Image (cartoon, helix red, strand yellow):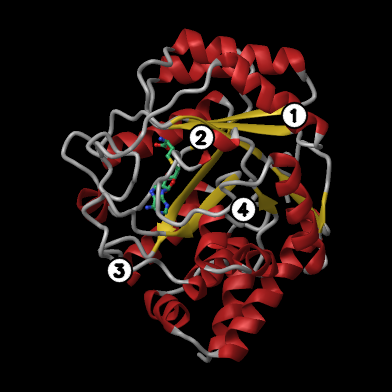
Amino acid sequence: MDLIGIIDKLKDTRDLTNEEWEALLDTEDEEALSYLSSCARQVREKIYGKAVYIRGLIEFTNYCKNGCYYCGINCKNTNAERYRLSDEQILACVREGYELGFRTFVLQGGEDPYYTDDKIVSLVRAIKQMHPDCAVTLSIGEKSEESYRAFFEAGADRYLLRHETASPDHYRKLHPENLSWENRMNCLKTLRGIGYQVGCGMMVGSPYQTTEDIISDLRFIKEFHPDMCGIGPFIPHKDTIFKDEPAGTLEMTLKLLSIIRLLVPDVLLPATTALGTIDPMGREKGMQYGANVVMPNLSPVMVRGKYALYDGKICLDSESAECIKCLSARVASVGYEIVVDRGDHKNA
Ligand code: SAH
């Protein structure tokens, strides 16, 4: 089958053979990629129109007890300058974000034991009390079912927990012994069972990632049918053992955005900051390949540089108001429009 045939098959059946996946994942054929992205846009526009949803990202702690090899804030990195935001600082970010039109706030951080369940619960409650019309998303890693339930009952709506890789062997090459692939995957299922809108995802071009691993990721994503899916290029961080590894590519990330849009038509798919970091037009291109979400940073400018998962991160010194202005223009430049909306998942 030629590539156009493979893309049509993907669109119609959402299922390909290994050989077809390999052909599609390996190709650099411009006609095929342009066809792939136009199919992805068509599917996205049928469900979400021209709307781009925004999520206000608040990176509230860069303390982490884990030693993920790829991540710049891993516990072994003694060069990382650690910080925590106070409740007041976090609520100030929310207040400012609300004024700017944000209706979803994402609390992201390392796995920081300082934030006990009680602290997270009261933070979630405070945000929901202040703005009942907003969604709260948590992205704070692997917790017990009990903790996830407590956060949900406090009002958290969504949870982002990238699966990182659907291959247990690949997982082992990216994480130390005390972390387990099974536990991460179980967390995703638990979150779904509790009733969260759930996001999974992976880095593109992470060290040791093979085409086979990517095929496993895609099959997992199709089967899990996440509400959100976060993918962005791996970018090396100077203080990690992967400092000399190459970054993931723009081309592969864009291709995978389109493929994921076709596999899970109604998925909320962000054009990530990492994509904007490897290419100055990365996020715009992401939207042209089927992304429909952007997640600008609402963290106070003084801590932005410290939440350094990878080197070269963009938007380190623009205030939130400037960021949203800049992003609105970028989104408009590719024919889409940022909306003031919670941007919940729509069942297609
Ligand atoms: N502690 C939370 C949040 C992790 S940070 C958790 O465990 O889910 C969010 C995501 O950033 C990670 O899931 C990972 O996929 C991504 N990330 C980490 N290091 C990165 C790097 N060097 N390059 C690109 N993305 C990275």
Judge the density around disc 2: few (<14), some (14-19), many (≥20) Cα neighbours within 10 Å.
many
Of the two numbered discs 2 and 1 in the rendering, the one whose residue sits closer to the viewer: 2
Q: Nearer the N terminus, badge 2 or badge 1?
A: 1
Secondary structure of the residue carrying tag 3 is: loop
Label 3 – label 1 distance at C-alpha = 42 Å
Looking at the image, which is closer to me, 274 or 191?
A: 274
Corner quadrant of residue 153: top right
Percent position of residue 5, x then y: 58, 86
**Residue 150 makes an appearance in the image:** no
Percent position of residue 15, x then y: 51, 68
Mark number displayed over residue 329: none
Q: Nearer the N terminus, badge 1 or badge 4?
A: 1
- Residue that carries the numbered disc 1 in the rendered image: 96
Q: Is residue 45 left or right of residue 305?
A: right
Secondary structure of the residue carrying tag 2 is: helix
Q: Quadrant of ligand 1?
A: top left
Of the two numbered discs 4 and 2 in the rendering, the one whose residue sits closer to the viewer: 2
Percent position of residue 27, x then y: 46, 85
Q: Nearer the N terminus, badge 3 or badge 4?
A: 3
Corner quadrant of residue 261: bottom right
Q: Nearer the N terminus, badge 4 or badge 2?
A: 4
Amino acid type, mark 2: Val
Label 1 – label 4 distance at C-alpha = 22 Å
- Residue that carries the numbered disc 4 in the rendered image: 270
Label 3 – label 4 distance at C-alpha = 23 Å
- Residue that carries the numbered disc 2 in the rendered image: 303
